[in-house]
Amino acid sequence: MQNFNYSIPTKVFFGKDQINVLGGEIKKYGSRVLITYGGGNIKKNGIYDKVVEILKANHIEYWELGGIEPNPEIGKVREGVQICKDNNIDFVLAVGGGSTIDSAKIISVAYYYEGDPWDILTREAPIKNALPIGVVLTMAATGSEMNSGAVISNKELKQKLPIGHPFMAPKFSILDPSYTYTVPKNQTAAGVADIMSHSFESYFSPDKGAYLQDRLAESILKTCIKYGKIAIDEPENYEARANIMWAASLALNGILSYGKNTASSVHGIAQYVSAYYNTTHGVALAILTPVWMEYVLEDKTVEKFVEYGVNVWGISPDKDKFAIAQEAIDKTKEYFTSLGLPSTLGEVGIGEENLENMARDAIENKGGVIGNFKPLYYEDVLEIYRRAI
Amino acid sequence: MQNFNYSIPTKVFFGKDQINVLGGEIKKYGSRVLITYGGGNIKKNGIYDKVVEILKANHIEYWELGGIEPNPEIGKVREGVQICKDNNIDFVLAVGGGSTIDSAKIISVAYYYEGDPWDILTREAPIKNALPIGVVLTMAATGSEMNSGAVISNKELKQKLPIGHPFMAPKFSILDPSYTYTVPKNQTAAGVADIMSHSFESYFSPDKGAYLQDRLAESILKTCIKYGKIAIDEPENYEARANIMWAASLALNGILSYGKNTASSVHGIAQYVSAYYNTTHGVALAILTPVWMEYVLEDKTVEKFVEYGVNVWGISPDKDKFAIAQEAIDKTKEYFTSLGLPSTLGEVGIGEENLENMARDAIENKGGVIGNFKPLYYEDVLEIYRRAI
């Protein structure tokens, strides 16, 4: 097991009607709030009204930044920072999923920077301070509600950059599983793929130790497998939504990766599918994960796939190693398909046209190599894209 | 899944040589430190010298409270509070295992109370404030290093009372697995039994949901089963010590019980074995756990034992339900025995003499009923004690 420093300071209020803590929690930090949200779904399902009602009842002033889209853009962040600066905002409340939360995080740190917020993503500008952030989660996927990372896109530059800083950890996150009842099937499916991918990114590492962490990752994976389909077929199944929601938070709050030498593989590759085609993050992951698995399966890695197949999919350990590995990969692919997710880039309208540029950008973004389970170079990434078509 | 409020604010510095953060971490909070420790083992293995060297190098003044014993006594707490009050202590550093940490926690809150510290355990005195606490962990067992609970005994009153409060969560805990290399075999074994028992207490609950939490509990159990014996046979096996150490922290930091309706069963029964006979906590748990399991096994509970047997012990799900359950219980018992732990109260010198009083005290302490997986009353507890003889 590798050394690690554990710190997960975000308080989580999980369950039905936990929204009722919102006023009291915000008032610990501020009274002039910027609310960030997405495409307006929260206005249809009543969550917006509930939040506003609570803010008013608590005499908390608020401003709004709506219209944040999936693969959130730096433009919206710039807009949010301006609102904060113009109005002496002292608290940022994200009401939504990963895009909304990630935007809130960068707004909160860019507030303390005079230049262009994009400089924070490129690391030209160091993070020195942040407005406190709170979250009302409406989608289970990225885990952003319980960690200190964010990913922001820049369409002009065709870049999508991640950054993390302890200041960016939300002070609190309200996780009411019933708030995800209205998430459409395709987005629920993409979310489940994202959660599973986060688990895979920790699980498939070169570490031989950290046995406990791998069992925890299997717990998340088994939970996704058990409840993902149920959440899609029965959108108001509370237990399914609750298990998926909590799995999302645990999959990327650090608990799976602490003590392991992890380096994302599929995320690094999928990122440039979304950067070029705006493909839903989880969809890109679902397509590329089984392809990546088959590509990296070899003598050196087969044991880990056996572990995965036996422990997660219940495949008999008595079979041939490579047969178990292949069966596990097939089951992974079939599972994504059963959720209604596409299994090729072609299905989402992507052809050969940009693959070389995407591979080049993906590799450059990671300083020349992606992942460490099997380190991937330009030719590898390009080949994975090609096989995924 | 039940509603829950998650908060685990303790920072954990895990791994080799993490002791080097000690000076900087303490100085965030104070400069006049009370060090609490146990029977002096830390003076033999060099940990005490290292701590003192760091405090001196950082110009941190320190006072000492040594000699804290297993099943820590309120007398030592009183002594510690007096040292704090006499010397304007502003930080309490526990260097040891659960007893040392629990004592530090109660000292830290009793410092702000004028009366007898025992009043805090009986809840006659409310907790209003606490000195900040840090931990250098030297034994993997209770999980106290990452939660806000403590258990203190009062021999005079033959009582052992638990209490929890957010103020009592350590600010930081330093977990260097190599610090547990010198823990004797019997104490390592008792620690593993304690970790497993904490997992069982969450796992065996009346909840039908919280699927994810139960998979997490199985992760801890599988880790104990894989590495417990190795840690005993090869005391300097870093990977074994690391996995057991981290398992101990996760088993009782809340991650297994958040979202579940849990109520300890075996802890409530074992507590009065220790209160009457000063039996090592983990030893009492190891003896009583399989007896409790057999006692509560019935139509209503058998499915949970099947889940346990299949998922943790790899028993074939095709067998008869009760056969699987019994095999799982047998394997649990055999595993404890393989660690060198006793399997009867007789082996640790306990006879029939106090069983009725113990059962009465155990039940009274819990307000008339112990646990909720199968609620236990006086006659049940007495019968479990009897079967354990």
Image (cartoon, coloured by chain):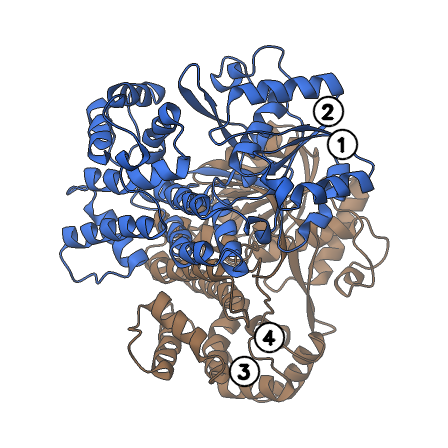
Chain colours: A blue, B brown
Q: Amino acid at mark 4?
A: Asn
Residue at position x 45%, y 78% in the image: B290
> What separation in Å lies between label 3 and label 4 (alpha carbons)?
27 Å
Q: Amino acid at mark 3?
A: Ile
Residue A155's place in the image compared with A33, above or below, is above
Chain of the residue on which disc 4 is drawn: B
Q: Amino acid at mark 2?
A: Ile
Q: Residues within 10 Å of mark 1 (few under 14, many from 20)?
A: some
**Numbered label attached to residue B350:** 3
Question: Are both tags, 4 and 1, on one chain?
Answer: no
> What separation in Å lies between label 4 and label 2 (alpha carbons)?
48 Å
Chain of the residue on which disc 1 is drawn: A
- The residue tagged 1 is A30
Label 2 residue SS: loop
Chain of the residue on which disc 2 is drawn: A
Chain of the residue on which disc 3 is drawn: B
Label 1 residue SS: loop
**Residue A230 percent location from the top left of the image:** 43, 58
**Which is closer to the viewer, label 3 or label 1?**
1
**Which is closer to the viewer, label 3 or label 4?**
4
Sequence-first tag of 2 and 1? 1
Label 3 residue SS: loop
Label 4 residue SS: loop
**Residue B125 percent location from the top left of the image:** 82, 59
CB under 8 Å between discs 4 and 1: no
Furthest residue toward top: A115
**Numbered label attached to residue A89:** 2
